[in-house]
Amino acid sequence: MIINDRLAELDLSKYRLSKASGVPQATINDICNGKADLDKCSAGTLYRIAKVLGVSIEDILDSDKTEYRSSFEIFKSNICHRVKDMGDTDFMLDLLQSDKIRTLFNKQWYPEALYLLAMLDYLSRVNSLPLCTKYDDIRSRRLSKPLYPIDVLMTSEVLKSDEPMRKAEKDAIPEFRRFNIIENEVRNVV
């Protein structure tokens, strides 16, 4: 955990961290011993600890997580909401600065990496911006099988027909279809 590591690096005791941050020593002890769930700690508590240790709240929260991979549908939804909340250009800048596409690709999380790259390319096209050449090596890849939205798969199953899948493929956004990701709508999120 980053808190224990930073305490050691700074040669700082839990007691001193408590005094410097104003966070009760019992809380510090529970956090450092893994008894406290960091996701349930208040933002103020984490902020005060982070400030004393010279790290971000995100660093503290991320250090406590074992890597969790959500379903692809949830991932897509989260990305679409981020685009909506941030706006196209801020999302694109954030994505390029974080290098999340490369990170996911290197972890072999290909659907997620290719979805982000497709989103980047789609947003570049609709905003008349040039493609970022940083990911040209990844652009040559594609998923081995089409990845359909869950609603298309369910409709196809209920109707006992492949027609919904064929229609979704035909209507798919080209930047996504290139990677064998069938995506028709990234703007209308609730």
Image: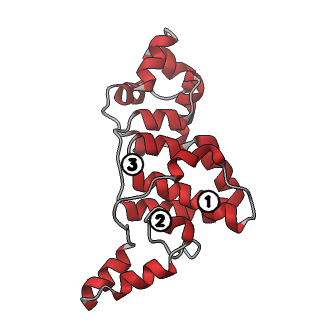
Secondary element type, mark 2: helix
- Residue visible at 57% across and 61% down? 119
Q: Which residue is mark 1?
A: 121
Secondary element type, mark 1: helix
Q: Position of residue 137 (x, y in %)?
A: 53, 45
**Mark 2 or mark 3, which has the lower sequence index?**
2
Q: Position of residue 140 (x, y in %)?
A: 50, 52
- Residue visible at 43% across and 85% down? 167
**Amino acid type assigned to the residue bearing label 3 in the image:** Trp
**Amino acid type assigned to the residue bearing label 2 in the image:** Ser
- Residue visible at 41% across and 20% down? 4
Q: Quadrant of residue 99?
A: top right
Contact between marks 1 and 3 (CB within 8 A): the answer is no
Q: Nearer the viewer, mark 1 or mark 2?
A: 1
Which residue is most to the top? 11
Contact between marks 1 and 2 (CB within 8 A): the answer is no
Query: Along the horizontal axis of the image, is 167 left or right of 158?
Result: right
Residue 141 visible in the displayed image: yes
**Mark 1 or mark 3, which has the lower sequence index?**
3
In this rendered view, identify the residue nearer to me: 68 or 11.
68
Q: Which residue is mark 2?
A: 77
**Amino acid type assigned to the residue bearing label 1 in the image:** Asp
Q: Which residue is mark 3?
A: 109
